[in-house]
Image (tube, grey):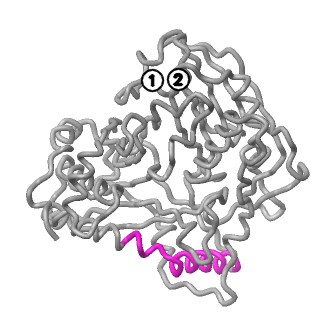
């Protein structure tokens, strides 16, 4: 796949936001997020809007999302902030000398790095956009954004707003995002911690020093398969719960983990609707904490799907109003004491085995990402260098289906492929 960069530019918001010296301190939810860029890739079949239309819409919508056009900096107290200085978003325009369908498929993830801008250390821009034009008229839009600026919900809202702006130029009914980050982290009058946050959100992550090359793959789960899984859980469950229970079992088997070991999943939980009063879903920033369902491997493999779903559900339910406010209070107390709370994250190349980490885009409606000629034909996540990570995404090809992006050790891929669609009899029942 030959690519040629035809233009690189800094695109600024159409309307400047406040003054150039406005500093927005990062909240504690921002600071516990991954401290770097993350990428998302969307493919569109011809016809598609022109680059001029896309850039014009992007400039317009950045006026509503000024953080993305800002820069990270330090304030007078040496605290990390976002400077709302309208410095701009980097836009890279690329010509690809082949057809889209020949380069991208559900499994075709080897050349994705060519489709999005590099985000090595030293990148100042908090968002980058690459517009890849294929000779067939197809288009791939790739975004990278610094996670300190916003979580998946925020970036989903931004992408939908951008698409709406391009689809309906001149329309002024765009929903304004809720931008007051300080309002979501106000501690109680008498701060009180009820949980050991030092050993949860701020625990030093330690994994086996053995590293194995992770291979990325994508697995599609059809509507019918998901319905079969749901039928195994009396009383009902979500597609997220049943698929996660299924993959937890299958990945553990494929890894060959000892029955006496314990395995847990780190599940990203959107806290907006869990705190009281609820934070608006259009809040732009980070508001994610994590749940940690945990089981002995022997129990995981012998329990029914319904029982494993209950374990997952109980862990997620614990991230409630009480827990979230305890987290906010803990961080406020630490700040008063002058303590520095550092982000904990796993270095690239690490294996999480026997554990897993899951993020979900199932709440994102791809139908909203319509720039005027229909929603994306495919969605991709770049190669993930950490073994044991999983991403759920609504399928672009089958309404109600789910595409799962995961990274596993190369020597475990074949076995996982063999068993990933099998449902054992022991899985049935309560």
Are the residues tagged 2 and 1 within 8 Å (C-beta)? yes
Q: Residues within 10 Å of mark 1 (few under 14, many from 20)?
A: few
Q: Nearer the viewer, residue 277 or 92?
A: 277
Q: Position of residue 79 (x, y in %)?
A: 74, 61
Q: Secondary structure at mark 2?
A: helix
Question: Does 177 appear above or below 303?
Answer: above
Position of 208 with respect to 173 (left or right) is left
The span picked out in magenta is 315-336
Q: Residues within 10 Å of mark 2 (few under 14, many from 20)?
A: some
Q: Nearer the viewer, residue 368 or 118?
A: 368
Residue at x-position 63% and y-position 46%: 146
Residue 317 shown in magenta: yes
Residue that protrudes farthest toward the left in the picture:
425
Label disc, if present, on residue 114 of the rendered structure: 2
Residue tagged 1: 111
Residue at x-position 32% and y-position 60%: 241
Dominant secondary structure of the magenta stretch? helix
Question: Does 423 appear above or below 326?
Answer: above
Residue 355 shown in magenta: no
Position of 417 with respect to 101 (left or right) is left
Residue at x-position 79% and y-position 37%: 170
């Amino acid at each position: 796949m030959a690519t040629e960069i035809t233009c690189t530019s800094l695109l600024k918001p159409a309307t400047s936001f406040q003054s150039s010296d406005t500093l927005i301190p990062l909240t504690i939810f921002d600071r516990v997020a991954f401290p770097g860029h993350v990428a998302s890739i969307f493919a569109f079949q011809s016809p598609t809007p022109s680059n001029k239309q896309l850039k014009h819409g992007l400039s317009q919508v950045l006026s509503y999302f000024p953080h993305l056009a800002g820069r990270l900096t330090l304030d007078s107290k040496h605290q990390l902030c976002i400077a709302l200085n309208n410095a701009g978003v980097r836009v890279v325009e690329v010509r690809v000398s082949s057809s889209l369908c020949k380069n991208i498929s559900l499994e075709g993830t080897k050349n994705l790095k060519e489709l999005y801008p590099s985000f090595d250390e030293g990148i100042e821009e908090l968002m980058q956009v690459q517009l890849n034009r294929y000779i067939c008229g197809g288009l791939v839009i790739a975004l990278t954004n610094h996670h300190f600026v916003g979580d998946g919900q925020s970036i989903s809202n931004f992408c939908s707003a951008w698409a709406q702006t391009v689809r309906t130029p001149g329309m002024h009914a765009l929903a304004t995002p809720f931008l007051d980050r300080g309002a979501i982290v106000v501690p109680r009058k008498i701060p009180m911690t009820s949980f050991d946050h030092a050993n949860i959100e701020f625990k030093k992550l330690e994994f086996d020093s053995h590293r194995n090359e992770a291979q990325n793959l994508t697995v599609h789960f059809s509507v019918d398969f998901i319905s079969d899984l749901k039928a195994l859980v009396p009383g009902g469950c979500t597609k997220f719960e049943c698929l996660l229970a299924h993959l937890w079992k299958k990945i553990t088997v494929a890894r060959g983990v000892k029955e006496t070991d314990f395995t847990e999943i780190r599940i990203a939980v959107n806290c907006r609707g869990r705190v009281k009063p609820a934070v608006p879903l259009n809040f732009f920033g980070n508001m994610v904490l994590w749940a940690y369902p945990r089981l002995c491997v022997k129990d995981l493999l012998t329990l029914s799907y319904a029982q494993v779903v209950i374990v997952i559900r109980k862990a997620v339910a614990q991230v409630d109003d009480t827990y979230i406010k305890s987290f906010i209070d803990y961080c406020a107390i630490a700040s008063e004491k002058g303590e520095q709370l550092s982000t904990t994250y796993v270095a690239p190349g690490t294996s999480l085995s026997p554990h897993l980490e899951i993020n979900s885009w199932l709440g994102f409606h791809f139908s909203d990402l319509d720039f005027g000629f229909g929603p994306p034909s495919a969605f991709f996540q770049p190669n993930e260098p950490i073994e044991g990570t999983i991403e759920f995404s609504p399928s672009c090809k089958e309404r109600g289906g789910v595409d799962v992006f995961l990274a596993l050790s190369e020597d475990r891929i074949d076995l996982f492929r063999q068993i990933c669609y099998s449902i054992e009899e022991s899985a049935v029942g309560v």
